[in-house]
Amino acid sequence: MQDIAKGNYPFAMGRATGMLDALLDPSNGSINLVGAQGGKKFVKGRVAYKVRAKSCEILEDGAVPSVCNDGTEPLPLEVEVTLDKHISTPTLTFTNDNMVNICQDTQAFVNEYLLSYQKALRERLDEIMLAKADDKIGVTRHQDGSADTAIGGYKDKQLLATNSGVTTPLFANFSDIKLDYQYNQLSGIPRMVGNGTLQKFMELAGYSCCNASGVAYDSAIATTGAAFYVDDAASTILGANRFLVFAPNLLHLLSWNKNANIAINTELRRRIVIPDAVYPGLNWDLDFEFTCDDTWNFKLSGWFGLFSAIQADSFGNEDNTSPVCEDELVGFTGVMGYRATSA
């Protein structure tokens, strides 16, 4: 059947996984935890970070202190990073009879299902990463003076207008999003992950998405001023026409493979780590057994988490005694939410 349908063979079709594309883009990097704590429920670590100095801390005139007196000690903060999401295929069993019936050798038959289930795992992992990124949306300030968007909130932004039956993209409103990005002191090219109305805006504007087939990253951002990644699950996970905006090198996919320190690899039993067929930086645990009933059993799995370089208290909070005054970015996490509208 695949020889007939080619790329439209249902067994081989799949969704656009823009969140994974953004996280695993070589320019973004990733973090892999080596095999340790095997068999435990989760893998964890601790990351320390500092709170920046602010202009409101600067003293003037008679308030300028003497170094002969003790001052305020800046206190570093810590966050516990946990990889608590374990995903796996069901255990799949293959019998020799099935392979004989379809005139296909064992290795070719199993490999096709390995690739198909890798695709399914990627799509589920993409949904999980979208949800985790959604949970990281913080307070967002807006350069036009409108009210801040609260933690977890999405700002409505009209990107399409229809007049006399003709739909046109609203470039000025799209620029507002990029200006918000700059106003919140982020650097680099903003990354946008979504679909729906945002995707239609990009199409009508003649902009390319960074995960479109045959489109180079530099070409995609050249006119857009943003790196847009289509994700077919965005409206389902985030809400209709909602999309995420965040900085490069801010969000990182954490991964861990239990088989990294097992590495059993024989004809009858395998506990190995195999690379994903699409993302070079993504690996899966392959557990494979040839049983006494002359069947082949296998499953693919992995441990994952999402780490943000900007924590909820990276700019301090009202309860902190140090720093001594509130940062204008208090509550900002580097992840912003918008909802693209049309009228």
Image (cartoon, rainbow, N blue to C red):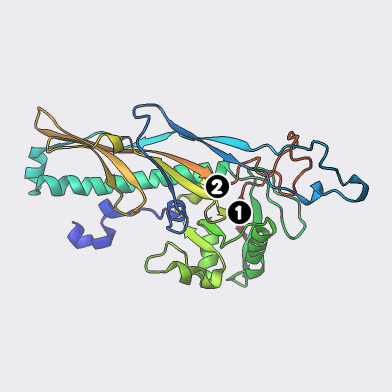
Say which of 211 and 99 sits in front: 211
**Count of labels in the image:** 2
Q: Which of 251 and 264 is in front in this view?
A: 264
Residues 149 and 260: in front is 260
Which quadrant of the figure has residue 98?
top left
Residue 122 location in percent, x, y? 37, 47
SS label for mark 2:
loop
> What residue sits right under mark 1 in the picture?
339
Left or right of residue 186: residue 222: left
- Residue located 34% across and 53% down the image: 280
Pick the quarter of the image with the C terminus: bottom right
The amino acid marked with disc number 2 is: Gly
Give the quadrant of residue 311: top right
Q: Where is residue 81 in the image (x, y as percent from the top left)?
A: 51, 36
Residues at marks 1 and 2 touching, judged by CB atoms closer than 8 Å: yes
Residue 343 visible within the image: no
In the depicted view, which residue is nearer to us: 72 or 294?
A: 72
In the image, residue 265 sits, relative to residue 118, either above or below, namely above
For residue 272, side relative to residue 335 (left or right) = left
Residue at (86%, 44%) from the top-left corner? 65
Q: What's the CA distance linking mark 1 and mark 2?
A: 9 Å
- 109 relative to 326 in the view: left or right: left
Quarter of the image for residue 314 reads top right
Taking the view exactly as shown, the residue that stands out farthest to the right is 62
First of labels 1, 2 by sequence position: 2
Question: Dot 1: what SS?
Answer: strand
Q: What residue type is labelled 1?
A: Arg
Q: Where is residue 236 in the image (x, y as percent from the top left)?
A: 49, 47
Where residue 70 appears, x then y in whole percent?
A: 80, 36
Where does label 2 land, which residue? 239
